Amino acid sequence: MEQIPHEAKAYKKTALFSNESVPESLLNFHLIQDKTWATINVQSGALIYRILSPVIEEIRLDPDHPGVVSPGVPHRVEFFCPVTFYLEFYRIPASLDDLRKSIR
């Protein structure tokens, strides 16, 4: 599991989801946008964060162990007990992103 770049800034936070209220799209294979990262923040219970590529990983997340979703990495979540969690999305501000490109 990768880390969120230090220069990335939070820009959006979802509502608190439970087993009953989670959008079905999170339970199925999906990707997040390019240049976007997310944290999966479990408030109670636990869930499985399944990374499907480039290396398959199955990570148990709980209140003490959040997950990081990287851009372009296929993933999904799975439940094995009651859980509440939210997602927080991050991106690099446009000016910093442009600067990083010019350095390469």
Image (cartoon, rainbow, N blue to C red):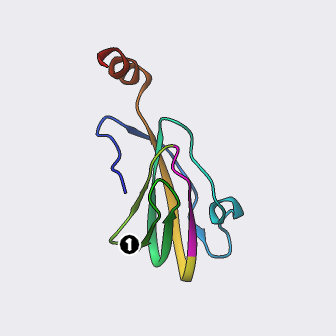
Is residue 35 shown left or right of residue 23? left
Label 1 sits on what residue type? Pro
Vertical arrangement, residue 68 with respect to residue 35, above or below: below
Is residue 95 shown left or right of residue 47? left
- Snapshot quadrant of residue 26: bottom right
| Count of numbered badges drawn on the protein | 1
- Give the x, y percent position of residue 89: 48, 46
- Give the x, y percent position of residue 20: 68, 75
The residue singled out by tag 1 in the image is 63
Q: Which residues are magenta?
A: 72-78
Is residue 7 shown left or right of residue 28? left
Is residue 73 shown left or right of residue 8? right
Vertical arrangement, residue 35 with respect to residue 61, above or below: above
Which quarter of the figure is the C terminus placed in?
top left
Question: For this rendering, which residue is in front, 85 or 49?
Answer: 49
Farthest front residue in view: 55
